[in-house]
Image (spheres, rainbow, N blue to C red):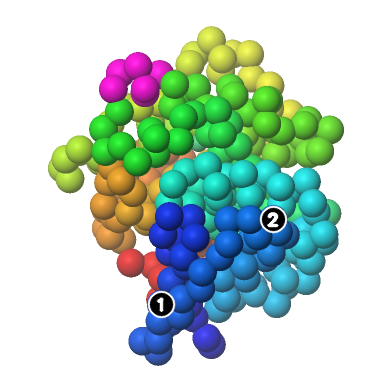
């Protein structure tokens, strides 16, 4: 099986891909590139070597023709200086779609799962770009950052996909309090996002979309834990278990997503 780690973006333009055979491939993308091409590049890189690659390529083929999705993901690629938002979005989309395939959902729902995962952070387009480069946010900036789910409505049309809409608005609900952000390795995360109890009581997630939103929450936390960001290092496998368990209070469904996604990554040697 050919396994590659996902591309690492540099300034949103250069992409470096490390192969398990110790090869390094690099590609320079033009910021003016057709959004469809940018989307296809990221999607292909993320799918390579996954156990469900063939199935996913098949069910995701309609997404290659989805101009609305490409446009939104392209905006995410261009918004954060390192391109990390675009890659994070595609990877969460693929992970959610993988879980949907494992659960033997019909193709239409796998596609919706991808849309929910890929567009969950669309509200970050409303957060100033410079904030994604900072190691530590000021209290005022944290307030802006934690509002990103509520900015989603400005950037996504509910008529496009209610799964994507609900995922964008609800992907931080139900966690103990935060992003997996660290200042100190002994403390797994800082409280950056607090649960808004009032909002929890006025939940807008449609009951039929709840399973997707839960998958999105799991996939996006796991991806954030595995990535190095300007404000945190990448967590190793042991640290990920600890942090994930703490964030989701050991919820059995989220823990099951965690185990399955870690197993998929381990098969491609991208798990540590
Ligand atoms: Fe988010
Ligand atoms: Fe996210």
Locate the C terminus and report the quarter of the image it occupies.
Answer: bottom left
Q: Residue furthest top?
A: 198
Q: Secondary structure at mark 2?
A: helix
Q: Earlier in the sequence, mark 2 or mark 1?
A: 1
Q: Position of residue 66 (x, y in %)?
A: 80, 54
Identify the residue at horizontal 26%, vertical 52% (top origin). 233
* Magenta-tinted stretch: 138-143
Taking depth in this image into account, of 140 and 2 the one nearest to the observer is 140
Q: Is residue 108 left or right of residue 176?
A: right
The residue under label 1 is 18
Residue 27 circle label:
none
Is the shortest distance between ligand 2 and the CB of mark 2 under 8 Å? no
Mark pair 2, 1: CA separation? 24 Å
Res. 223 visible in picture: no
The residue under label 2 is 35
Res. 111 visible in picture: yes
Q: Is residue 130 left or right of residue 56?
A: left
Q: Is residue 145 above or below residue 93?
A: above
Which secondary structure is most common in the magenta stretch? helix
Q: Position of residue 89 (x, y in %)?
A: 56, 50
């Amino acid at each position: 099986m050919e396994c590659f780690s996902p591309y690492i973006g540099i300034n949103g333009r250069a992409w470096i891909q490390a192969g398990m055979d110790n090869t390094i491939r690099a590609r320079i993308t033009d910021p003016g590139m057709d959004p469809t091409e940018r989307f296809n590049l990221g999607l292909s890189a993320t799918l390579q070597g996954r156990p469900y690659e063939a199935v996913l390529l098949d069910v995701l083929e309609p997404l290659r023709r989805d101009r609305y999705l490409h446009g939104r993901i392209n905006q995410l690629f261009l918004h954060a200086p390192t391109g990390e938002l675009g890659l994070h979005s595609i990877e969460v989309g693929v992970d959610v779609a993988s879980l949907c395939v494992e659960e033997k959902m019909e193709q239409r729902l796998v596609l919706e799962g991808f849309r929910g995962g890929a567009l969950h952070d669309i509200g970050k387009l409303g957060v100033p770009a410079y904030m994604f480069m900072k190691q530590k946010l000021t209290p005022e900036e944290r307030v802006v950052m934690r509002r990103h789910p509520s900015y989603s409505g400005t950037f996504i049309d509910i008529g496009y996909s209610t799964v994507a809409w609900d995922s964008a608005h609800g992907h931080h609900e139900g966690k103990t309090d935060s992003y997996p952000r660290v200042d100190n390795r002994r403390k797994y995360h800082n409280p950056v996002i607090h649960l808004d109890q009032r909002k929890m009581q006025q939940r807008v997630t449609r009951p039929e979309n709840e399973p997707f939103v839960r998958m999105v929450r799991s996939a996006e936390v796991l991806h954030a834990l595995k990535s190095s960001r300007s404000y945190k290092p990448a967590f190793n496998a042991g640290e990920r278990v600890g942090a994930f368990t703490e964030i989701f209070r050991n919820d059995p469904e989220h823990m099951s997503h965690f185990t399955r996604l870690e197993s998929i990554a381990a098969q491609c040697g991208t798990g540590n």
